[in-house]
Image (tube, rainbow, N blue to C red):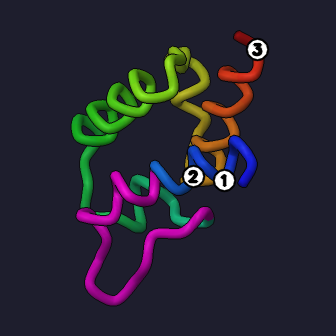
């Protein structure tokens, strides 16, 4: 499994409690519109992921992230730079 897949699996696990009853969380899930979640909870989950993967996602990058896959790719990219 690649780093992106590992990160994506962790994100999906963290976001699954917020999925709507008729959907699954996948890499294509748009975090703020496809889930029953607000921005405060998203930031809490991102902070947990940052701790888990020992990275820090800059706020300007967070603003551009829409999907689970984009978040996974961002975390994996930052992780590979360290």
Q: Which residue is mark 3?
A: 81
Relative vertical location of residue 61 with respect to residue 70 in this rendering, above or below: above
Q: Nearer the viewer, residue 34 or 23?
A: 23
Report how far apart the C-alphas of labels 1 and 3 lie in the structure: 17 Å
Q: Are marks 1 and 3 in contact (CB under 8 Å)?
A: no
Picture residue at 35% right of the left edge, 26% below the top = 47
The residue positioned 66% from the left and 22% from the top of the image is 79
Q: Which image quarter holds the N terminus?
A: bottom right
Mark 1 nearby-residue class (10 Å; few <14, some 14–19, many ≥20) = some
Identify the mark nearer the N-term, 1 or 3. Answer: 1
Q: In which quarter of the view is residue 12 placed?
A: bottom left
Quick one: SS at disc 2?
Answer: helix
Q: Is residue 78 toward the left or the right of residue 16 in the image?
A: right
Q: Earlier in the sequence, mark 3 or mark 2?
A: 2
Question: Which residue corresponds to mark 1?
Answer: 5
Q: Position of residue 25 (x, y in %)?
A: 45, 70
Total label count? Answer: 3
- The residue beneath circle 2 is 8
Disc 3 is placed on an element classified as helix
Residue that lies at the very extreme toward the bottom in this rendered image: 22
Question: Are the residues tagged 1 and 2 within 8 Å (C-beta)?
Answer: yes
The CA distance from mark 1 to mark 2 is 5 Å
| In front of the other: 79 or 44 | 79
Label 3 and label 2: CA atoms lie apart by 18 Å
Tell me the residue at 46%/50% (across/down). 11
Q: Is 3 one of the magenta-colored residues?
A: no
Report the magenta residues as a range.
Answer: 11-27
How many residues crowd around disc 3 within 10 Å: few (fewer than 14), some, or many (20 or more)?
A: few
Q: Is residue 54 above or below residue 19?
A: above
Where is residue 40, by image quadrant? top left
Image spot of residue 20 (x, y percent) = 29, 77
């Amino acid at each position: 499994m690649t780093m992106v897949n590992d990160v994506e699996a962790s994100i999906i696990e963290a976001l699954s409690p917020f999925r709507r009853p008729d959907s699954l969380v996948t890499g294509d899930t748009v975090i703020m519109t496809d889930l029953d979640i607000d921005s405060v909870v998203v930031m809490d989950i991102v902070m947990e992921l940052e701790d888990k993967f020992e990275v820090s996602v800059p706020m300007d990058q967070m603003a551009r992230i829409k999907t689970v896959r984009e978040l996974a790719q961002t975390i994996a990219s930052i992780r590979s730079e360290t």
